[in-house]
Amino acid sequence: EKTGGFPYYKGKITQKYDLYLNNLIKKHVSKKAPPKKPKVKRSTVRRPIAKDPVDKKEPTIKNLTPLNLEAKIYAKLTGKNPIYGGRITKAFKNWKLKINKEFQQKVGGKPYYKGALTQKYKIYLSSL
């Protein structure tokens, strides 16, 4: 089967089969060599990757440069910490959204530009 033909023809061994048998004898099989892995399609091996619940949480904030002003004002007004355990609290998030909406209604500008506080928004926050 491996030679691609019949091993015997009219009662005699074929040349291909004879060469195949000779090659089997010549091959040195070492006991130290690891067995070859069977070739399996990747689609049968793949499994869905389980995501850690840590990935769903927001990243920890070590450097609070854009939030410093907001965090300070929130702490002064409410007396609560805006960050607990390295993460932003829900109350602080809700407060930020509320203040952003008020700012947009009163002033008409956007509070952030490319992730940084705008000058008008800084003035508005400092006036609170």
Image (tube, grey):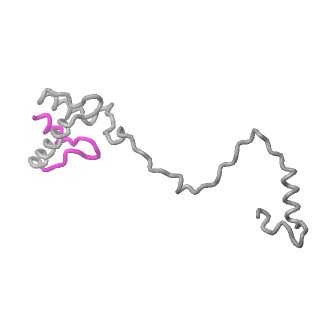
Please tell me which residue lies in front, 81 or 128.
Answer: 81
Residue projecting furthest to the right: 12
Q: Is residue 13 above or below residue 86?
A: below
Left or right of 9? Residue 97 is left
Residue projecting furthest to the front: 11
Any magenta on residue 109?
yes
- Displayed quadrant of residue 63: top left
Query: Looking at the image, which residue is at 30% across and 30% down?
Result: 86
Magenta segment range?
108-128
Please tell me which residue lies in front, 53 or 18.
Answer: 18
Any magenta on residue 113?
yes
Q: Quadrant of the C terminus?
A: top left
Query: Looking at the image, which residue is at 86% across and 65% down?
Result: 16
- Displayed quadrant of residue 55: top left
- Displayed quadrant of residue 124: top left
Residue 37 picture location, percent across and down: 65, 49
